Amino acid sequence: MEKSAKWIIFKGVAVMVIVALAGFLLFNGFGRHPYTADELESVFRAKAMEQNIISAPDEQVAMVSKEYGNSITFAMQTEDGERACATYGRSMFFDKYKELDFYAGVNGVLALDEMTYMVSDGAIAYDTTVRFGDDVEIIFSDEVRPIMYIKFMAVCLAAMGIFGCRIFMAGRK
């Protein structure tokens, strides 16, 4: 094999590796996923303690968690009316989670007994409604917006563009 053919193969493989790494970052997200599923409740309680929602990590509160899609949502309310909710998204490739959203307090967005926010967990986007009051409840919308296939199409289009340019440029030589 000629030296130029080896160089072309090397450049082609390098482009494929770069596209694969870009796809990995695009699909998995750019942040670390430091938590396992078993740690999420204690992480949520620790963050609520930082925000002065609860005074001790084992304090008795009305708390509920619910899994949907690629994420887990937690919500809590203390006897004093303090509230917190958080959503953690799972990595596409590993069984680890990262915090997507965290809301705490009784002012601002949590002042009402019902709060709705959008969650994008990397694969899909949907609305999450948290209801406070006598019972804490988490409700997920039926309307789901696909995010993964848009990411996949972007990577495919980028790869096709790169390889198309390479073929076009090789034909001009």
Image: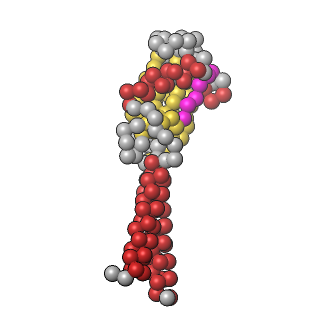
Residue range highlighted in magenta: 101-106
Asked if residue 129 is positioned above or below residue 123 in the image, the reply reads above
Where is residue 48 drawn, in percent x and y? 55, 21
Residue in view at x 50 percent, y 82 percent: 169
Residue pushed farthest left?
A: 1
Asked if the stretch drawn in magenta spans residue 103, the answer is: yes
Residue 153 in sight:
no
Asked if the stretch drawn in magenta spans residue 27, the answer is: no
Where is residue 166 drawn, in percent x and y? 47, 78
Residue pushed farthest right?
A: 108
Asked if residue 152 is positioned above or below residue 75 in the image, the reply reads below
In the depicted view, which residue is nearer to us: 156 or 30?
A: 30
**Main SS type for the magenta part?**
strand
Where is residue 24 drawn, in percent x and y? 44, 53
Residue in view at x 41 percent, y 71 percent: 10
**Residue 38 vs residue 120: left or right?**
left
The chosen color scheme is secondary structure
Residue in view at x 45 percent, y 74 percent: 163
Looking at the rendering, which quadrant does residue 95 occupy?
top left
Residue 27 in sight:
yes
Where is residue 151 drawn, in percent x and y? 47, 57
**Residue 69 vs residue 154: left or right?**
left
**Residue 66 vs residue 31: left or right?**
left
Residue in view at x 41 percent, y 26 percent: 39
In the depicted view, which residue is nearer to us: 140 or 87?
A: 87
Quarter that holds the N terminus: bottom left
Q: How many marks?
A: 0
Asked if residue 101 is positioned above or below residue 152 in the image, the reply reads above
